[in-house]
């Protein structure tokens, strides 16, 4: 018997906070690099540097509380409330904070600036787009461009694009950067916009460098891992990878040496010289291959697990529909048999019986295939069924009901309760020649439904009472519709059969 369980606190509820926390850490590190002088000396104050790290991080966390609150509340909201919450947290509050910062009369400065604002809002949007894609029904049938937008390829391109903008901004901020090394790591968006021709000059060259990195990733994922490793094994994968690295690194090095940024004594290659065959260039290419390989394998495994979970869910839904359809013939055959007997006897009860049957079948056809229906509709169906059975059995069977349902919009999977009642009639009233009884009760307390069905049994050993396909189907439907949220007891007690079903609605 499955037992009711109480769900423990879900740590995944804190996952929406990650985009803002990552933005806080990134802004803290950027400010630390801007404030701490670059030196090769090892005599600097370690405690002072940690203070420069933690104090701005704490201040940023305090200033980011509205952003964190908005991220935390968004999963519990829907519709226009969700858009309003995100707008207030990520648009209205940062705009007011920046306006307040411009009006401060003393030397104190708020740390929530435009770069941090843009990073936090961008990471938040990417997070919710990813969540929407993960929970979208039929995500695999979405257009290919939508799938690619949230893929590992797009994530890498986004990171490389950020690197291109960062490096271009640093080169724009530092005059004659190739001759004035080391560079000050500062990004000034306003200066980049004012000197847009120079910004474009740097952008296309760093974009070419980023495309070289993406080429290594693309070949590693789509050719070496998917084709060679998956189809030919590890040895040929390592052999082909070595051949690819040895062949490609001087070719890409020669390509990068054609960029105008290269000067006589310094180049954009990892080796910083004009030798495309330098060992350092091969080492960097190997590092890119080594770093990308576990990331690709982990992502491919996650995608396979997602596909398997989706397939399992679809199979469970298909099985649930089959089980729901199996309810109908069992009920229909029992009722038609009774109707046939009344017609043979030319009873006047046949016409009301046909009317009741049509109402019941209408409910089965139009409501029985839905995942959830109002509880009051399902109880009305059950009452009609009991009235129909009372007409069939007459005074021989005494039916007692005690349904107590508090006000509320309760929902339940359709045609669950009727399966216990059908079982009571099938193995009690229909096979008994003596007087019999069926008692039904229903309670709801703390969103937990308890339904009990007691019926008398004919005089025969209890172990001869068959369990029937009805209870087997009921148990399976409960496992699919209410996993770990139901308890079902069904057993003989002397000359009675007792069934009790508890559900967390």
Image: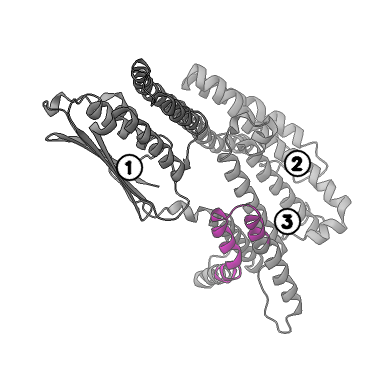
Which quadrant of the figure has residue 385?
A: top left
Q: Is residue 120 visible?
A: no
Q: Is residue 94 visible?
A: yes
Secondary structure under badge 1? strand
Q: Residues within 10 Å of mark 2 (few under 14, many from 20)?
A: some
Q: Nearer the viewer, mark 3 or mark 2?
A: 2
Q: Residues within 10 Å of mark 3 (few under 14, many from 20)?
A: few
Mark seen at residue 207: 2
Task: In this rendered view, identify the residue nearer to me: 32 or 267.
Answer: 32
Mark seen at residue 277: none
Write down the residue under mark 3: 181
Q: Position of residue 101 (x, y in %)?
A: 72, 75
- Nearer-N-terminus badge (1/3): 3
The answer to whether mark 1 and mark 2 are in CB contact below 8 A is no
Mark seen at residue 486: 1
Q: Give the residue displayed 64% in from the left and 61% down from the top.
A: 30
Image: magenta residue range: 58-87
Q: Give the residue displayed 77% in from the left and 57% down from the top.
A: 180
Q: Separation of disc 1 and disc 3 at Cα? A: 69 Å
Q: Left or right? Give the position of 396 relative to 296.
A: left
Predominant SS along the magenta part: helix
Q: Give the residue displayed 68% in from the left and 31% down from the top.
A: 143
Q: Is residue 361 magenta?
A: no
Q: Separation of disc 1 and disc 2 at Cα? A: 57 Å
Q: Nearer the viewer, mark 1 or mark 3?
A: 1
Q: Position of residue 206 (x, y in %)?
A: 75, 44
């Amino acid at each position: 018997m499955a037992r009711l369980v109480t769900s423990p606190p879900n740590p995944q509820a804190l996952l929406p906070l990650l985009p803002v926390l990552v933005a806080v850490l990134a802004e803290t590190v950027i400010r630390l690099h801007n404030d701490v002088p670059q030196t090769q000396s090892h005599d600097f104050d370690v405690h002072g540097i940690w203070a420069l790290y933690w104090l701005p991080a704490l201040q940023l966390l305090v200033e980011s509380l509205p952003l964190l609150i908005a991220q935390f509340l968004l999963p519990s909201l829907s519709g226009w409330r969700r858009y309003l919450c995100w707008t207030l947290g990520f648009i209205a509050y940062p705009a007011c904070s920046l306006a307040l910062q411009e009006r401060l009369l003393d030397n104190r400065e708020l740390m929530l600036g435009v770069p941090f604002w843009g990073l936090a809002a961008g990471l938040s949007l990417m997070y919710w787009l990813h969540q929407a894609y993960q929970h979208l029904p039929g995500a695999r049938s979405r257009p290919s461009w939508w799938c690619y937008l949230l893929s590992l390829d797009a994530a890498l391109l986004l990171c490389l694009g950020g690197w291109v903008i960062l490096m271009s901004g640093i080169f724009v901020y530092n005059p004659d950067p190739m001759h004035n090394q080391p560079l000050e790591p500062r990004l000034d968006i306003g200066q980049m916009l004012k000197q847009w021709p120079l910004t474009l000059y740097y952008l296309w060259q760093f974009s070419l460098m980023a495309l070289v990195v993406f080429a290594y990733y693309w070949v590693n994922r789509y050719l070496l891992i998917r084709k060679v490793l998956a189809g030919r094994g590890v040895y040929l994968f390592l052999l082909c990878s070595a051949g690819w690295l040895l062949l490609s690194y001087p070719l890409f090095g020669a390509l990068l040496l054609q960029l105008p940024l290269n000067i006589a004594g310094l180049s954009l290659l990892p080796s910083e010289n004009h030798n495309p065959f330098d060992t350092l260039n091969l080492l960097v290419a190997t590092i890119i291959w080594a770093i990308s390989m576990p990331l690709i394998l982990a992502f491919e495994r996650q995608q396979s697990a997602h596909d398997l979970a989706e397939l399992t869910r679809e199979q469970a839904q298909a099985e649930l529909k089959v089980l729901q359809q199996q309810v109908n013939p069992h009920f229909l055959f029992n009722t038609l048999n009774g109707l046939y007997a009344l017609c043979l006897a030319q009873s006047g009860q046949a016409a009301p019986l046909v009317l009741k049957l049509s109402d019941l079948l209408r409910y089965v056809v139009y409501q029985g295939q839905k995942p959830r229906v109002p509880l009051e509709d399902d109880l009305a169906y059950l009452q009609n069924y009991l009235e129909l059975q009372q007409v069939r059995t007459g005074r021989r069977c005494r039916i007692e009901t005690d349904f107590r349902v508090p006000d509320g919009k309760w929902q339940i999977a359709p045609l669950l309760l009727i399966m216990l009642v059908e079982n009571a009639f099938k193995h009690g009233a229909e096979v008994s020649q003596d007087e019999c009884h069926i008692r039904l009760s229903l309670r709801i307390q703390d969103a937990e439904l308890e339904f009990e069905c007691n019926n008398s049994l004919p005089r025969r050993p209890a172990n001869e009472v068959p369990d029937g396909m009805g209870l087997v189907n009921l148990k399976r439907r409960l496992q699919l519709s209410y996993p770990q949220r139901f308890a079902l007891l069904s057993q003989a007690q002397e000359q009675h059969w007792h069934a009790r079903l508890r559900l967390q609605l």
